[in-house]
Image (cartoon, rainbow, N blue to C red):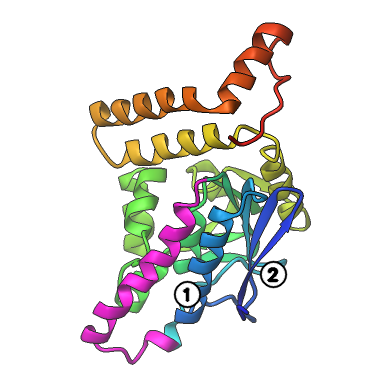
Amino acid sequence: MAEFVRLEVNDGVGTIRLDRPKMNAISVQVQHELRAAAAEASERDDVRAVVVYGGERVFAAGNDVKEMADLSHAEMVKLSASVSSAVTAVARIPKPVVAAITGYALGGGCELALAADVRIAADDATLGQPEVLLGIIPGAGGTQRLSRLVGPSRAKDLIFTGRFVKAEEALAIGLVDRLVPAAEVYDTAVAWAAQFSSAAALALRAAKESIDRGLETDLETGLEIERQQFAALFATEDRTRGMTSFVESGPGRATFVGR
């Protein structure tokens, strides 16, 4: 039984809930539990989309500095893969993933939010990558995912200075996608995820894979990834249902089964 991270499932939406008071610091144990929750969410057919949520007060204030403070270089060489792979496990969930951000999403917490497909934040939330203020750099994807999301110049500004980013600026630069009052963050994220509870799951998976893998390579290779994913969907029952329904009844009326 996980102590700090749990997967809760309701009506097709899985919530990966961080619960490590007071600030959801991401320890090695939390990293392990995040990987397990991401794997479970990926495998379960009754999970059609995922919300990552830290609770009403805080998303995650970063990796556990107290745990890392006395580590040697040799020890961190071994542990750094755990730091990165926990966030990557969330990023690789083959379903729509939304981060519901309240309070602070800093350091490793910001990197966890970056692993989601969409970020919905409280209008008083604060984000940032302040690792340089500790004499280190982001180690769980911040230099890579942040650059791809907001562009290299903005990412360098945020990472070089380590400054905190308030919600309005985060929205303006594309670090988050929507702002809502803090009390509405989770429900808004669940509503976004719930729209996929009856969607064509294999098509969503193919779309996410095409976008994410395509961004990792050149345009020509990305187009080939897309072509292969597109063609493969013609082997699915959902494609048959979708096109038959369109021809017979018009758009938006298909019933999908996830096969």
Q: x, y percentage for residue 39? A: 51, 61
How many numbered discs?
A: 2
Residue furthest to the left: 74
Q: CA distance from mark 2 to mark 1?
A: 23 Å
In the rendered image, which quarter is residue 72 located in? bottom left
**SS under mark 1:** helix
Crowd tier of the residue under label 2, counting other residues whose Cα lies within 10 Å: few below 14, some 14–19, many 20 or above: some
Judge depth for marks 2 and 1 and give the one in front.
Answer: 1
Q: Which mark is residue 32?
A: 1
Residue shown at the point (34%, 48%) measured from the top left: 147
Is residue 162 something one can see in this rendering? no
- Is 142 or 76 nearer to us in this picture? 76
Q: Which residue is mark 2?
A: 57
In this picture, residue 181 sits left or right of residue 28: right
- Does the stretch in magenta take in 20? no
Q: Main secondary structure of the magenta part?
A: helix
Q: x, y percentage for residue 252? A: 70, 19
Say whether disc 2 or disc 1 marks the residue closer to the N-terminus.
1
Q: Amino acid at mark 2?
A: Arg
- Is 19 or 185 nearer to us in this picture? 19
Crowd tier of the residue under label 1, counting other residues whose Cα lies within 10 Å: few below 14, some 14–19, many 20 or above: some
Residue furthest to the top: 247
**SS under mark 2:** loop
Is residue 220 something one can see in this rendering? yes
> Looking at the image, is 246 positioned above or below residue 224?
above
Residue shown at the point (26%, 28%) measured from the top left: 219
Q: Which quadrant of the rendered structure holds the N terminus?
A: bottom right
